[in-house]
Image (cartoon, rainbow, N blue to C red):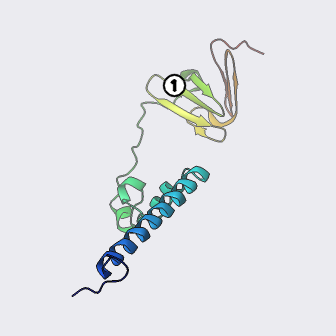
Amino acid sequence: MLTKIGSDWTLADWTIALCSVCLAIGSTSFFTWSYTVSIQSPDYFQQAALARMPPKLDLIETGSVGEAAHAEAMPAPTIVRDREPVPTDYQIVMIFQDEALLATRDELVRVKVGSTVPGLGTVKAIEGTSLGGTVTADKATLRSANTPDP
């Protein structure tokens, strides 16, 4: 039988009451701590969850390839032209920051300073203006239709 401790409470009553008080104090402490942490560092729980996640490395998704894949890689396309382009074949489509898009009748070429372009040679300078700009190469200087001659 259960032993009586105190007035009308048994040992089981005291055990349940003590567990209930401990649970209430623990819950209050946990929610107070989590609220305080979320106020001080709003991203804490998200960062902690992400830190515990194993990395998801998909070779295709990251663009990585194994050593064996190099032997089976597709070759880059080779551009076949009926003749080598000349500077007059090129037009400036767009200049943005330090890059330019040049077009011929059959091709669209993205260039930077240092790029080698068939028919133009190595690009020496790209200068953009509000009216277009210029692309200076070894063999010629291209100007946008709106850019006045110097």
Question: Along the line of sight, which residue is nearer the eye, 121 or 61?
Answer: 61
Q: How many marks?
A: 1
Q: Position of residue 89 (x, y in %)?
A: 54, 22
Q: Residue at x 58, y 21 (%)?
A: 88
Q: Is residue 117 above or below residue 150?
A: below
Nearest the eye: 52 or 85: 52
Residue 128 x %, y %: 69, 24
Q: State the residue at coordinates (38%, 80%).
A: 6
Query: Quick check: 59 left or right of 111?
Result: left
Q: Which residue is mark 1?
A: 103
Q: Is residue 1 above or below residue 131?
A: below
Q: Determine which quarter of the picture holds residue 77.
A: top left
Q: Judge from the rendering whether residue 70 lies leftward or rightward of residue 44; answer left or right.
A: left
Q: Work out whether residue 90 or residue 110 is closer to the camera in this orientation and state it.
A: 110
Inspect the image, locate mark 1, and give the three-letter code of the amino acid beneath it.
Ala
**What quarter of the picture does the N terminus occupy?**
bottom left
Bin the neighbour count of mark 1 within 10 Å (Cα to Cα): few under 14, some 14-19, many 20 and up: some
**In the rendered view, would you say 143 is above or below 16?**
above
> Dividing the image into 4 quarters, which one contains the C terminus?
top right
